[in-house]
Amino acid sequence: MSKNTSSSMFRKVDVDQFNEDNYQDEVIEEVEDQQGPTESDIQSLLNQKKNTEALKLLLANPPISKQQSFKDQAFMLIVRVLTNFPTRDIEAAVNSLDPAMIDTLMKYIYRGFSEPTDSTAATLLAWHEKVFAVGQLGSIVRVLTDRKQV
């Protein structure tokens, strides 16, 4: 015959935790002191013709703060570094980056595409070509689907 169905011991899974309305984004603990490299650090590297080191320094620790001013400052530094690169050195610089830095650089390039200026459009297109050659389509997909923006 049938078993006793009045017992609720078989219900051990809390189905309410899987409700879409209960979803919460990942909580990132903000460190207010972590603002990345300063403008003077980057300028001194650019004056010494160490463009690749300046780029790596900026891409290694992008700002994770929710304050837009930190992100804007980092974006302006990245654009300054990218525009200071000679065209012949772009490919070597991109090849020296690790995959996480490639994705971060692609994020900055797409942000530059969303805020175009006459002086940066051609530079960003040249960088996009070289970064795409290394990162392939996967880099673009990761950048466009990532919730964390630069």
Image (cartoon, rainbow, N blue to C red):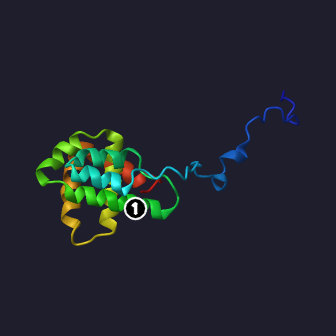
Left or right: where 2 falls relative to 81 = right
What is the x, y in percent for residue 94?
Answer: 23, 45
Query: At numbered mark 1, what does the secondary structure look like: helix, strand or loop?
Result: helix
Question: Can residue 14 be seen in this snapshot?
Answer: yes
Left or right: where 47 falls relative to 74 = left
What is the x, y in percent for residue 67?
Answer: 51, 61
Question: Can residue 138 be seen in this snapshot?
Answer: no
Q: Give the amino acid at mark 1.
A: Gln
State the residue lying farthest toward the left. 88
State the residue lying farthest toward the bottom. 118
90 relative to 122, above or below: above
Q: Which residue is depicted at the point 21% across and 69% down? A: 119
3 relative to 51, above or below: above
What is the x, y in percent for residue 115?
Answer: 33, 69
Q: Which residue is depicted at the point 76% across and 34% down? A: 12
Q: Which residue is depicted at the point 28% across and 70% down? A: 116
* Quadrant, the N terminus: top right
Residue assigned mark 1: 73
Left or right: where 107 falls relative to 147 = left
Viewer-proximal residue among 87 and 102 = 87
Viewer-proximal residue among 103 and 57 = 57
